[in-house]
Amino acid sequence: MDLAAGEHQAKIRGCLECHGADLGGQVLALTPIGPMIPPNLTRGQGSVTAQYTDADWQRAIRHGVGPGGRPLILMPSDDNTSMSETDFAALVAYVQSIPPVDRVNQPTSLNLLGKILLGAGQLPMLTVERIDHTQQPKAVAVAATAEYGGYLAGICSGCHGANFAGGPAPGLPPDAPQAANLTPAGRATGWSTAEFATTLRTGKRPDGTQMQPQFMPWPAFSHMTDVEIEALQRYFQSLPPADKRT
């Protein structure tokens, strides 16, 4: 198995951003609705995946479901549902190859306010509820094409919407910046490929404004190759203009 390819997937899909550089879990945020603490994915003490079967990895990564059918909070499985079997296998192999980290983390949990908001449908933090679970893994040739860009854009859909028109991102507080419109109706439509690449890799837009990494995870996307970035731009440019998120 190509572990380098798996590491690349872990980087661009934000696994290291959430679970930590050693994948041993970390405190991502202490919020008014409870602590957000992605768990230890290694085989060390405190691991949540030590007993995972192949089916468990599939359910967690693609469907947002943990062992016993428990919905996973904040797990961006809607970004990964249609991941190719090749990329998926490489990612899992890489995670399983990481040296064990002994770190027992407090699990992510919602306090009373969080539970009330979740029950009222005001807290869209369970991706299992947003996923089309009938989707099939895709196999697309790696090339600077709109087709390959469409495959990669699945990583962006959780925040930017199925039609990439942006707007309020699920799971973020109401005062968070809205996800950008990535269709030709958005501000990026006139950017060159070099400007688009610089934005993804540094978080700095062509107008000099800086994106906040806690809302736009550009540090993860900074690992994308030139081919991946050009493919993404080609795909977004090929979309019909949209001004309302779907």
Image (cartoon, grey):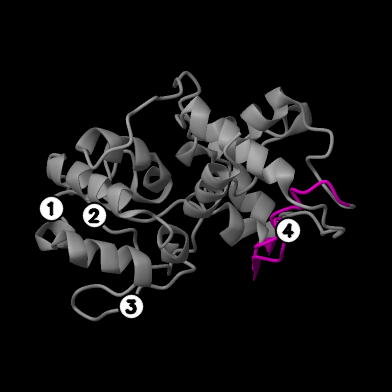
Residue at (34, 42) in percent of width and height:
153
Sequence-wise first label, 3 or 2: 2
Q: Marks 2 and 4: CB-CB under 8 Å?
A: no
Taking 212 as reference, is 48 above or below it? above
**Residue 101 counted in the magenta span:** no
Residue at (24, 54) in percent of width and height:
181
**Residue 40 counted in the magenta span:** yes
The amino acid beneath tag 3 is Gln
State the CA–CA distance, disc 4 to disc 1. Answer: 38 Å
Sequence-wise first label, 4 or 3: 4
Q: Is residue 224 left or right of residue 234?
A: right
Taking 105 as reference, is 43 above or below it? above
Residue 146 point in image, percent of width and height: 21, 38
Disc 2 designates what residue? 181
Q: Marks 3 and 2: CB-CB under 8 Å?
A: no
Q: Secondary structure at mark 2?
A: loop
Numbered mark located on residue 210 in the image: 3
Q: Nearer the viewer, mark 4 or mark 1?
A: 4
Please provide the residue range marked out in magenta: 21-44
185, 125: nearer the viewer: 185
Residue 41 point in image, percent of width and height: 74, 48
Disc 1 designates what residue? 185
Disc 4 designates what residue? 25
Q: Nearer the viewer, mark 2 or mark 4?
A: 4
- Mark 1 burial class by Cα count in 10 Å: few <14, some 14-19, many 20+: some
Sequence-wise first label, 1 or 3: 1
